[in-house]
Amino acid sequence: MRRLAIFACSFAAAAALFVWLLPPVIALLIAAALLAAAALLSLFRTPSCKRAKLCALGLAVGLLWSWSYERVKLEPLRAYCGEEQVISVEVSDLPQETAYGCRVGARLAGGNILLYLNCAPETLSLGDTVTVNAEVVDVSRGSGDSENLYYQSRDISLLGFQRGDVEITPAESLPLRCYPTAAVHAIRSHIDRLFPDDAAGFVRALLTGDRSGLSYRTRNEMSITGISHIVAVSGMHVSLLVGVIMLLCLKRRRLGAIISILVMLFFAVMLGFTPSVTRAVIMNGILLLASLLKRENDAPTALSFALMVILALNPWAIANISLQLSFGALAGILLPTPRIYRWLLRLLHDKKLQKHAPLLSKLLRSGASILAASLGATALTQPLIAEAFGVVSLIAPLTNLLVLPLISLIFPCAFLLLLVGWLLPSVGAVGATALSYPIRAVLWLVRSLAKLPYAAVYTNSGYIVAWLVLVYVLLGVYFLPRKRKMHPAVLLSCMLVTLIGACFFSAWEPGETAVTVYDVGQGQCVLLRSGDFTALIDCGGDSGDEDGETVARSLLMSGRRSVDVLMLTHYDTDHVCGTAQLLSRIEVGTLLLPAVEDDTDNCERIVQEAISAGVPYRFIAQDTALTFDGGTLRLFAPTDGSAKNASLAALLSAQEYDILVTGDMESAQERELLQTHTLPDLEVLVAGHHGSKSSTSEALLSATAPDIVLISVGKNRYGHPNAEVLARIAAIGAVVYRTDRNGDITVLR
């Protein structure tokens, strides 16, 4: 079976080359050369030549298959692209609400399109035909950027945006291909009815992979503690199902294998054959069939064959991060885990313990098995996680050790309760209520562990990236040589010492006074620092809670778990949307809020979050000065809180170094500020309203003569920063830095 593994791995490598590197014409030429090489190698009978021939054939077939897939399936779809196209599609997924209507997955000429419409989600149902005048964009290959790979890796080849009238024709009956999607929707609705609200979201994620019921905070805590995999339906879940079935069948292994295969197929259909579930079903199916047919049972071969099948259906799936993590985790469990487990067993080997406390000895062995699997999976997935999500969980082994035994209980019980709940709703409801307690225990454990200092470190620090590279160099030195000379204790000590050094240098802050403008897209978040005093001005951007997490991670990696002041200039979403997440991660001494009008519910929501976090808050209705050792933070309240873009402004003055932040203050308010206050010459000015034409007036620039102007801006449709503003800044000789071009900007004194 290892010959199949060589061919399948080569096929996967070819798909990766085609997707990320090779133009189609070059891929064809290389495939032809590989076929010729395979023909030449077939003349030789040595084992190495046979393996080389299989490898060449796998690469050639993989390149040819990927080229054919693009030509046959993707090229016809690209004919629909254009600014004004009338298309007719069949709704194949449940619509999701957006700011301007909804988005919905649909079928078009044998491919998938993600269609953005201006209508409400309730107007669409599975199987409906939608005829619309739309702008259609190709994301199947395009320029090959990461965003295009994101869509096609999920088998979405086109994006459509409504530009004219839309006509919806209801389906007479549900098409057969929509049955799995309808089943998933029915299951998720059933879970919501069966389980209490605080447990239903977790069960939906655990059983169906739908994480929409989990808050961003919970998902982030799972990422920090290294257990996001438990809500990404994969091999663990399928293996648990198979394990429970085999246990119930006792010694009837053949019957258990047949039932397991049927249940796995049902589970895969129920979830719409997502890549991770498909991989798990194929792998477990091969292993069970090998047992039934009394054939060789080889897990690496099953893993590589499952990957080949998934890539045959869509070569671009190789770019799917979920698929990469799923296969990486299982490869980690198959490869380094046994060696780690044997090492842990040697540490736990105690004949007296086995003789006098056999139960404790068995529990320790079970814990060692979980820990070894966690370490093995982490070893092969951590680089992917660090690159994709920017986090390195240090507490993951402990979290997995504590949580996985509970998950092993919760998952099969929830699955069985789902079936019981359909037949006996009252019995299912009682069982669901009982099961919600261990679910709450899992969520409490995750929340508590995520709050521990250095539960995770983050790749926004270059020192942490360097440490991670060093760790894998050390692992290579330890695992690759056959004659190992390094003791495991030496390996762990090197990792720990270098981690401490990386954290120390990440926390080292040069300069006595500094201003940092974070790159949060089209929004604003500014950190003012002078000595031990820190003030955060605004916490928003264009990514919601993610903006608050971005700032929190930056503060944590700089060694700060708290800030003295969090001040909001006004309540526009792009200035406050990350506040709730920040309050959950960073201790805030005082929250300062502007006494200005709020035509949203942002002010009320932020106050409630502050109360929940135990953070004192104040409304600033008049000028206020906060003194600290070596300087002053002056807050300028607007005279008219109802004026357009009325904002609270902040001036940090420390040792003749002055930094001014004005929020979205407009020119009229800037002139009023100059008339009622004497402002010093500035070293740094944070441009108002992201460089809008109506802010950062000539009067303000002339009066304050800043040396440096910082602009917090992202991709936008408003034309920020405005050319006139940039010209005004250039006229006074100030240097401009922009977050959309420079990323995070820090100016030191």
Image (cartoon, grey):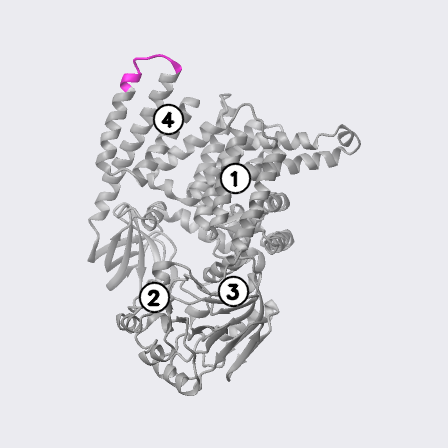
Extent of the magenta region: 39-47
Mark closer to the chain start, 3 or 2? 3
What is the spatial separation of the Cα atoms under label 3 and label 2, in whole angstroms? 22 Å
What is the spatial separation of the Cα atoms under label 1 and label 3, in whole angstroms? 33 Å
Q: Looking at the picture, tell me which residue is in the foreground, 539 or 106.
A: 539
The residue mark sitting in front, 1 or 3, is: 3
Q: Name the residue at the right extreme.
A: 356
Q: Quadrant of residue 221?
A: bottom right
Name which residue type carries label 4. Answer: Phe
Q: Name the residue at the front extreme.
A: 656
Mark closer to the chain start, 4 or 3? 4
Mark closer to the chain start, 4 or 2? 4
Q: Quadrant of residue 737?
A: bottom left
What is the spatial separation of the Cα atoms under label 4 and label 3, in whole angstroms? 60 Å
Residue 747 at what x, y percent from top left? 43, 63
Q: Quadrant of residue 344?
A: top right
SS for dot 2: strand
Relative horizontal placement of residue 204, taking residue 43 as reference (left or right):
right
Name the residue tied to disc 2: 736
The residue mark sitting in front, 4 or 3, is: 3
Q: Residue 42 magenta-drawn?
A: yes
Q: Looking at the picture, tell me which residue is in the foreground, 680 or 71.
A: 680
Name which residue type carries label 1. Answer: Val
Relative horizontal placement of residue 371, taking residue 651 as reference (left or right):
right
The residue mark sitting in front, 1 or 4, is: 1
The residue mark sitting in front, 1 or 2, is: 2
The residue mark sitting in front, 4 or 2, is: 2
Name the residue tied to disc 3: 512
Name the residue tied to disc 4: 7
In the rendered view, tell whether residue 518 sits above or below residue 60: below
Name the residue tied to disc 1: 471
SS for dot 1: helix
